[in-house]
Structures are given as structure tokens and as C-alpha cells.
Amino acid sequence: MKKQQKVSPTLQRYLTFGVTPNKKKQADAVEKLKNFIIISKMKIDSILEKNATKTYPKLVSNSPANQQMIDAIKALLKENLQEKTNFEVNNLKSFINSCQYILDIISDDPKVSVDVLNFLNNLNATMRNKKDYSRLKFERKALVNKVSRYINNTVSITRLDYLKNLLLEANQKFNEEYSYAPPHEIDHILDDYIRNNRSKDLIRSLATFVAYGEPDDGFFNTIMQFVNELIDDFGITTNNAQVIIFTSCIRFLFNESYSIRSILNEYREENSAFLIKCDLYSQQPASSLKLSKDIEKYYVPGLRISSLFKFKQVSMLKEMDYITNPIDMMAQIFFIIDSLAQYFGSEVGVLAFDDTLTLFLALMSMSPPSNCISIVKFINKWSELQSSRVFKDATNFFLIAVEQISRIEIPKSEEITSVQIFKNGE
């Protein structure tokens, strides 16, 4: 029992003394420990070989000052790799010694058993959780990101100049009345700039934040910090240009987050049921919509409501299927409402509230986005990202329309009369 006295508290918690272990379990534990030792030795050989054969590409900058900084960062990268190598090798050797020590105890004393699964699991987690190891990995990523910026300096300057020129073009299309920057080529260039000048980890972190976060002060502060850093990169001072960059950033982040998780992809059963209700509502004749007399000239009363609309108006709703951010989503709803006002309204393009809602209900029933219920929840969550009060007010028509159509009950019988549908939709 001499070995028992020498066991450290760290290892002793995995050992049980004085009880004869199950032979099969003991043999399994021995095999696992031996395999762990073999694998650890192979890892050491691999780490040492990787370190010995590590090569760095020739990093060149047109700027002497940048070249000096690149060379300094390369030296720090080499030091970091050596320190990381030493850390990993020393820890693996320590693990091997611990495994071998337990094997020696088991072979010397038949009344000692080991909780091998917890022991090996904790060994594997030990190195990952050590602060020094985390620090080394963080430092390496930071150095790689930093050197990338200096390497791409010439390209970045060209890209930056091009982006500034595009910003001037985007500013010409900027809608000052609604403080809205419509989609523009600058979105793609900014996307490229972010990917080349911000780390993948940062982008992934922000996208995940959008996918799972809540629109509270913490969220907005995080997003605005990201946006403001880009604004500083470009030396932007005008309010319109800042809104353009902000809107482009929102497009970028919501596009990135869409592949992680989006409300727009959820509530599939509810969305499917809503499409059925839209189809039921759309079977009404145009005369049952109770529109103002001024609008009667635009349709034949006996025909279905589909006769009311132009193809462009119908297609505008379907385009919402492809929008992934709340700013453009709410803007699109406004432009649909505006198109109805321009076509059915007075000479100055004005429609009464009731006529606007009725027409929007009819249009939605004809050609709804495939995920209307999801869109409602999406807008309710992210509406504060839209600064335009006009766009927010227009969005209410969409929300009310979805609510009213949702009230329709899907009858068991497939034979539905237009009177039944209309009553259910009221």
C-alpha cells in the first residue's frame, strides 16, 4: 500500500482502494489508459514536427513602415508558436506520466480500481481550460489578424477609395424624406471590406448575437460599436453617409445570421395554415370588399379580387420572401402601400385608411409571402432598427392584415362559398 500514500489528491479522487474491481471493467480501464498514452505520444511527435517544419510566407508591403511592423509581428508569431508548442508538449507528457502512474498502481495492487472515463475526460479538458493556453491562442489570432491588415494595406487602400466613391453614388439615391438607403452596390463592397478587415470570429460572434440575441440596450450598443468603427475607417462625417453604412451593416449581419438561425425560417405550420386562409379570402368577388365608390371604376364587381391589381403590385409582396433584414422588410411594405395609393388614390395619391387596409388585405390574400406569420414576429422583434416613422406606420397595415386573415377558420368541407369566407374574414 506504499503507492497509495504517494498518490496526489488530484489523482486519488479517481481511485478506489480496498475493493476488488470487476475484471472486465479493470481490463477495459487498462486498455483505455494504454491507448491514451500511445495517442498522446503520437500527438507530441506531430506537434514537434509541425513546429520544426513551420514556414511563413514572404510578407511584403509597399510601405517601409508597414514592412517593419510585418517583420516584428512575424517574430512574435514565431515566439508564440514555440511557447504554444512547449505548453502542449509539456502538458501531454504530464498526462502520460499520470496515466502510467495509475497503471503502475493497478498492476501493484489488485484491490485498486480507477474511474477511467472521468479521469480521461478531465485530462482532455484540462489543457483547453487553462488560462495560459487560452491566452496563447487568443494572442495568435490577434497577431494573424493584425498582420493581415498590414499585408492587405495596398489592396485595402484601393478598396477603401472605391468604397468612398460608391458612397457618393449611394448618397445620390438616399431617400432623405424617409431616411432610407435603398440596396446599392456599396452593400457588396462593404461586405467584402468587412470580411477582409474584420476577423471571422468577430463576424461569427455578431451574427450569432443577431440570431439569438434580444433587441435590448446591450444589443444596440454592440451593433453601434461595430458600425462606428467602420464609420471611423472611412472618415465619414455626414449623417446621410452614416445611415447608409448603418443600413449596409444591418443587411450584412442579418444575411450572416440567416444561416445560423432566423425567425423568418420558423413557424412553418402556422405559415402553411395562413396560406390556406389567404386562398379562401381571395375567392371573394371584388364587390364584397366594401371599397369606396371612387375605387369602383378600377374593377368589375362580378370578378374576383385578383382583377383589382397589377402584376407589379402582386410581385412586390412576393419579393418579401427574399428579404432577410427588418429595415428593407418594413421599407418594402411601405412601397407596396404607396403603390396602392398611387394607383387607387386621388390625383395626389391619397387613400383613406379603410380603403388602404381593405386593398392590402385583398392583395395579400392573392400573393402572400410564404412566411407571413414569421414576418410578423420578425418585425415585432426588430422594428426599432427602422428609424423611419412613416415606414413603421405603413408596417401596421401588414400586421393588421395578417391578424384579420388569421381569424378565418379553415372549414372541414372543401366547398366554401364566398359569403362564408367573407363573414369569417370580418
Image (cartoon, helix red, strand yellow):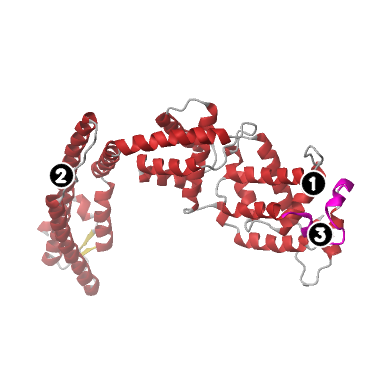
Magenta span contains residue 113 = no
Which percent across, then down, holds residue 211?
50, 48
Left or right placement of residue 341 versus residue 114 in this view: right
Element assignment for label 1: helix
Residue topped by disc 3: 424
Q: Residue furthest top?
A: 237
Q: Residue furthest right?
A: 293
Quadrant placement of the N terminus: bottom left
Residue at position x 54%, y 37% from top? 216
**For mark 2, does the 10 Å Cα neighbourhood hold few (<14), some (14 to 19), or many (20 or more) residues?**
some
- Mark 3 or 1, which is nearer the eye? 1
Among the 4 quarters of the image, the one containing residue 157: top left
User: What residue type is disc 1 on?
Assistant: Phe
Q: Earlier in the sequence, mark 2 or mark 3?
A: 2
Magenta span contains residue 301 = yes
Q: Which mark is residue 344?
A: 1
**For mark 1, does the 10 Å Cα neighbourhood hold few (<14), some (14 to 19), or many (20 or more) residues?**
many
Residue at position x 21%, y 74% from top? 23
Which percent across, then down, holds residue 238?
51, 26
Pointers 2 and 3 in contact (C-beta within 8 Å) = no
Question: Distance of mark 3 from mark 1, alpha carbons?
Answer: 26 Å
Between 213 and 32, the one nearer to me in the picture: 213
